[in-house]
Image: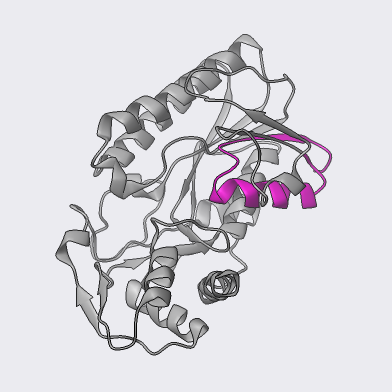
Amino acid sequence: MTGQTLLITGANGFVGAHVAATAAAAGHTVWAVGRESEPTGALGPHISEYFSADLEHVWEFPTGPDAIVHLAGLAAVGPSFDNPQQYLNVNSGIMTRMSEALIRERSRARVVVVSSGSVYAPPVAQELITEDSPVVPSSPYAVAKILVETQAAYYAERGLDTVIARPFNHIGPGQGPGFLVPDLTAALQELNEGENLRVGNLAAARDYTDVRDVSRAYLTLAFAPGHKHHVYNVASGASHTGHAILETIADALERQLPTLEVDPSRFRPTDPAVITGSASRLSDEFGWAPTIPWQQSVREFATLTATAS
């Protein structure tokens, strides 16, 4: 359905610009909220309104969006171990502020609450992770996401139309540092000939979905007439190692694979060998499926980065 109004929180982030672009291309009016004083260059062309606000402390926006994709909050696993309480305070505080305001307004907007596949317990025997798989607070980031999911369920009982998306790893053009593809690309570009490349656990295999396919999933949930479930995974259904990612980056940059030097300090306290998500619920109900191969996503990121440098 076209011609509706979408509000994106945390819109200046990696995912927000892609959600805005996808929504605008589908004919929707896009409003965006970010902490920054103005929209990024990637976001600006796709929105009609931008609001600068610290959502942990304020929610004052025009009423009337038909749907909200809620991306705002602290969004990296690694740093959460150093600032656990901050992750809880910020992510939960934003959810409370937004939800209480929407209830006061008697809003009928669909709220897509973006959680994470990291809330799941490590899989047994490399099984696919479904929405019915056990949830375990394995990091402060996961604790914060589980808390926000619980809030979403609470506010659904109070009348908000909330639905939870649990995306697994997503990649693609515009992703910032602190994630595997950008960090490996930067490290390889900066490496001098003959030097070893210091890496973390590249043997770990993860489920990667292109951010543009992830954006389509969020909009599918946002504008569907209804939803049979309260939680939906967003995943490709296949996993790939860090070694495979590095090989694809090296090929895209036309660089030889360097000798690797494993740095144990880069390992996370909890780091399962293989994580693969199942998005069959999203596929069966709405027909969503990934369309962009992970290799294409990685190559696009690497070549665009090389061109810009």
Q: Is residue 212 left or right of residue 63?
A: left
Q: Is residue 42 left or right of residue 302?
A: right
Give the residue furthest to the top.
104
Q: Position of residue 84 (x, y in %)?
A: 26, 34
Q: Position of residue 251 (x, y in %)?
A: 47, 86
Q: Position of residue 230 (x, y in %)?
A: 50, 36
Q: Is residue 48 left or right of residue 107?
A: right
Q: Residue at x 58, y 72 (%)?
A: 300
Q: Is 112 situated above or below 293?
A: above
**Is residue 131 in view from this perspective?**
yes
Task: Looking at the picture, tell me which residue is in the foreground, 284 or 274.
Answer: 274
Q: Which stretch is magenta?
A: 1-29
Q: Position of residue 59 (x, y in %)?
A: 58, 18
Q: Is 249 situated above or below 35?
A: below
Q: Is 26 situated above or below 309?
A: above
Q: Residue at x 72, y 45 (%)?
A: 44
Q: Is residue 45 left or right of residue 122?
A: right
Based on the displayed image, in which of its 4 quarters is residue 151 positioned?
Answer: top left
Query: Which quarter of the rendering shows the N terminus?
Result: top right
Q: Is residue 28 magenta?
A: yes
